[in-house]
Image: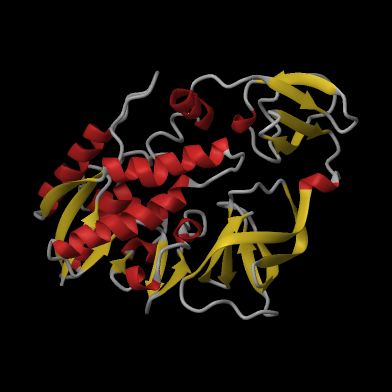
Amino acid sequence: MKVYVGMSGGVDSSVTAAVLKQQGYDVTGVYMKNWSQDLPGFVCPWKEDYQDAKRVAVQLGIDFKMYDFETEYRQKVVDYMVAEYQAGRTPNPDIMCNQEVKFKLFLEAAVEDGADMIATGHYARIKDGQLFAGLDKNKDQSYFLYRVTEAALRKSLMPIGELEKPAVRALATKLGLATADKKDSQGICFVGKVGIKEFLLHELGPQPHGPIIDQTGMTIGEHDGAIFYTIGQRHGLDVGGGLPYYVVRKDIKANTIYVTTNLDDVALWSKELSLQELRWINDAPAEGTEYQARLRYRGPLVACTIDGDKLILQDEQRGLAAGQSAVIYDNERVVGGGILA
C-alpha cells in the first residue's frame, strides 16, 4: 500500500511517517510548499521546515518530494481569509486549508502520482470513512477537519490520532528523529508568529479610522480600521479607564465599532444561530436529536439540536462572530458543521 505523507518539518508528521513505515506501508514523504513570503519583521521558515522534513525522510530511508501549491494556497486560503475580514467576518484559514489544499489538492496530486492513500499528522481519528476526535483531548484537531469529505477520509490516514502528544515526542526521541525536540509551529506560517492585524495591514495597507461607540451611544474613542476587530474582543481597543469594553457589533460600511461594558448585554450572547455552507461528512444530522457543538477551537462542547440551517444551543454562548465555524459532534464522532451567518 503506497502512502504519501504530508511532512511539514514538524515532529507530528515526522512520527506519522515513521509509524506508517513500521506498519509496513510503502511511504513517500511530501513537503507542501504553501507559503514562502517573508513579511515585515518575520522570515518565513519554509526552507528550514523543508530541510527538516527531508532530514527525517533520509533517516527513515523513504522517498521524498516537494509539491508547490503556493499559487492555489494564495487563491483558496489567503484571498478567502482577507475577503472575509474585509466583509466584517472572522474566518478560520486552517479549516479552508484542510478543505482545499491538504485533503483536495494534495490528495489529488498524490493519487495521480501513484499513491493509494495520503496521511497527515493530525490529532484526529478516521474509522470507516468517519471522523472522530483525537485521543489527546488537549491536542484534538477534529474541529479543523469538519469540511473534509467522506471520500477524502476513505483515502486518508491519521495514525497519531491514536496517541497523546507526550507519546509522540517520546517516540520521536526513541527513533532519534531530527525533529524530536522541535517546537510546535503556531498555525499557518503567516498567522501565529505574525498577528492577523499585521498580516492584514501588509495585504491591504492602513485602513480608515472610525468611531468606537458605547452602549449609551457615546463616542468613546477611535479605532484604526473596523476589519481588525472581532465580536467579543476585549483587548486592543485603547479606550482606557474603568470597566473593560467588549466589541458587540461592527458596521463595516459606516466603519464603526460598537462596544459595551455590560457582560449581560444581549448583543453579546447567542442561543439560536444561522449556519451557512453546511457540510455533513456522512449523513445529515437528525432533526430534534441532541448533539454537541464546538463553536471555536478548544471551546467547550455545548448541547444542541439542528433544525434545517438553524443551530439551537441549550445554553447561551458569548462573543460569537459571523465567519467562525460551528462543528457538530455526536459524542466523539464529527457529524459536520457550518459557518456562522
Image mark count: 0
- Residue placed at 70% from the left, 79% from the top? 288
Q: Which quadrant of the structure image shows residue 225?
A: top right
Question: Where is residue 275 shown, x and y percent of the image?
Answer: 62, 61
Relative to 21, say whether 268 is above or below.
above
- Residue placed at 60% from the left, 43% from the top? 89
Q: Which quadrant of the structure image shows residue 61?
A: bottom left
Question: Where is residue 176 shown, x and y percent of the image?
Answer: 20, 48
Q: Residue furthest front?
A: 253
Residue closer to the observer: 100 or 133 = 100
Observer able to see residue 180: no
The C terminus - image quarter: bottom right
Q: How is the image coloured?
A: secondary structure
Relative to 298, say whether 158 is above or below.
below
Relative to 231, say whether 108 is above or below.
below
Question: Where is residue 260 shown, x and y percent of the image?
Answer: 82, 34
Question: Where is residue 158 shown, x and y percent of the image?
Answer: 33, 64
- Residue placed at 25% from the left, 50% from the top? 7
Please give left or right for residue 194 compared with residue 59 in the image.
right
Observer able to see residue 103: yes
Residue closer to the observer: 315 or 312 = 312
Please give left or right for residue 253 compared with residue 337 in the image.
right
Please give left or right for residue 94 compared with residue 50 in the image.
right
The N terminus - image quarter: bottom left
